[in-house]
């Protein structure tokens, strides 16, 4: 396959291949970092990986840096990073990591079944983010809060999405449900950063829900609490 058309599954095979010099230790750290271990939390930090693996933070940083440098030389991962930049652009410049991984699955495909399909896509996205964040001029950035991970072309775009998510949580908690028109009006009150294009109403609602901790969008474009019936 051409590096620019590798499927998510093929990319994962390349990404999850450890350096022979790092052995079992390197493989375990790689699996933990990319969320491919049963012990991995969602989008673990290097501190999280150190705590679970029992290795020092310095050793984790050393292994991650070596892995980043190896990935930087891989033409397939270079093309992957360009694909992610293009997907972010199509999403308005910012997306939750789950949105981005779903877009990547559409763009590159996977033959796996859920939930492994989404897990592998997240791992591939994580690898791309790890490489991009160590570049001199990164094309996209990550914002990791306690309950959400946002990827954006600029830091302030991620801050905007985070604020949208907070507002979406407030809207979703109201009873009765807020009408879509009022929800959109409330979300539009969140100051839009310069250079971020005005989002369509549909994208605004989806981004707000994806950036929230407990909101979802119903088929009628209403924001409601996840896990609860949208009809209240």
Image: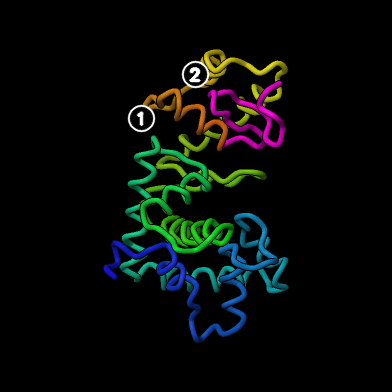
Quarter of the figure with the N terminus: bottom left
Q: Which image quadrant is residue 134 in?
A: bottom left
Which quadrant of the rendered structure holds the C terminus? top right
The x and y percentages for residue 73 are 34, 71
Q: Main secondary structure of the magenta part?
A: loop
Q: Residue at x 50, y 38 (%)?
A: 158
Give the residues drawn in magenta, as a range: 211-232
Which circle marks residue 188 in the picture?
A: 2
Relative vertical location of residue 145 with respect to residue 191 in this rendering, above or below: below
- Other residues around mark 1 within 10 Å, as few (<14) / some (14–19) / many (≥20): few
2 or 1: mark nearer the eye? 2
Q: Where 31 falls versus 141 (above or below)?
A: below
Q: Which residue is mark 1?
A: 195
Q: Position of residue 40 (x, y in %)?
A: 66, 63
- Per the model, the C-alpha gap separating discs 2 and 1 is 16 Å
Q: Residue at x 40, y 69 (%)?
A: 10
Residue 134 among magenta residues: no
């Amino acid at each position: 396959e051409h590096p620019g058309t590798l499927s998510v599954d093929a990319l994962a095979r390349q990404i999850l291949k450890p350096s022979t010099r790092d052995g079992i230790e390197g493989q375990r750290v790689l699996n933990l970092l990319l969320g491919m271990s049963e012990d991995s939390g969602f989008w673990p930090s290097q501190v999280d990986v150190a705590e679970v693996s029992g290795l020092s933070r310095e050793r984790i940083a050393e292994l991650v840096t070596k892995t980043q440098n190896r990935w930087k030389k891989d033409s397939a991962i270079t093309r992957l990073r360009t694909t992610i930049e293009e997907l972010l652009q199509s999403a308005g410049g910012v997306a939750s990591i789950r949105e981005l991984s779903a877009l990547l699955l559409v763009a590159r495909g996977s033959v796996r079944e859920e939930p492994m399909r989404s897990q592998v896509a997240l791992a591939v996205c994580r690898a791309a983010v790890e490489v991009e964040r160590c570049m001199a001029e990164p094309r996209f950035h990550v914002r990791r809060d306690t309950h959400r991970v946002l990827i954006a072309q600029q830091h302030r775009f991620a801050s905007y999405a985070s604020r949208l998510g907070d507002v979406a949580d407030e809207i979703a908690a109201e009873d009765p449900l807020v009408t879509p028109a009022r929800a959109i009006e409330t979300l539009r009150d969140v100051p839009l950063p310069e250079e971020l294009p005005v989002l369509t109403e549909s994208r605004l609602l989806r981004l707000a829900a994806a950036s929230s901790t407990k909101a979802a969008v119903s088929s009628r474009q209403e924001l409601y609490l996840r896990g609860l019936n949208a009809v209240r």
